[in-house]
Image (spheres, rainbow, N blue to C red):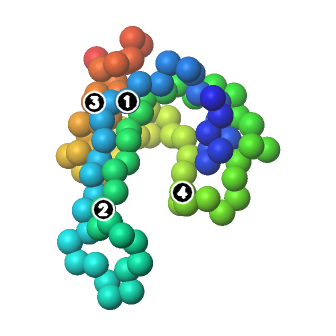
Amino acid sequence: MVSGATGRTVTASAAMIGFIHFHILARPADYTYPCSGFINLVYLAEADAHLPETMRAGDVEVGIGFRSLAEVLTFDLSPDERLFLQAALDARKDAPR
């Protein structure tokens, strides 16, 4: 499977580890969407090859990219993000303990 946003292939064994439900409490007057929220699914997958020619220009993602685990562990993550990171680490066989 190739991600059009990142241009990376990922293993077919991607597993959903959770989801995030966003709910917009105060919709602006010009809000044109029928729903005031959305759900993002969170998956664990291993990145393989990089195929930049498959990337979609102007997609909805902003600042997407891959980071090393050592770098991610230095980020100022929210409690929810830390739970997803821990779930992903727990699912990896080679994860540092």
| Element type where label 1 sits in the image | strand
Q: Which residue is mark 4?
A: 61
Q: Residue at x 30, y 35 (%)?
A: 18
Position of residue 32 measured from the top left corner of the image (x, y, whole percent): 41, 78
Q: Which residue is mark 3?
A: 86
Question: Is 77 drawn above or below residue 60 in the view shown?
Answer: above
The circle drawn on residue 16 is: 1
Q: Residue lying farthest top?
A: 93
> Which one is in front, 44 or 21?
21
Mark 4 is surrounded, within 10 Å at the Cα level, by few (under 14), some (14 to 19) or many (20 or more) other residues, namely few
For the residues bearing labels 2 and 1, Cβ distance under 8 angstroms: no
| Element type where label 3 sits in the image | helix
Question: Is 13 drawn above or below residue 73 in the view shown?
Answer: above
Splitting the image into 4 quarters, where does residue 51 fall? top right
Disc 3 to disc 1, C-alpha distance: 14 Å
Disc 4 to disc 1, C-alpha distance: 19 Å
For the residues bearing labels 3 and 1, Cβ distance under 8 angstroms: no
For the residues bearing labels 2 and 4, Cβ distance under 8 angstroms: no
Which of the two marks, 2 or 1, is nearer to us in this view? 2
Position of residue 78 measured from the top left corner of the image (x, y, whole percent): 24, 50
Tally of marks: 4
* Residue 77 visible somewhere in the drawing: no
> Which one is in front, 95 or 29?
29
The disc, 3 or 4, on the residue closer to the chain's N-terminal end is: 4
| Element type where label 2 sits in the image | strand
Q: Is residue 52 left or right of residue 74?
A: right
Which of the two marks, 4 or 1, is nearer to us in this view? 1
**As shown in the figure, which amino acid type bears the numbered disc 1?**
Met
* Residue 36 visible somewhere in the drawing: yes
Q: Which residue is mark 2?
A: 37
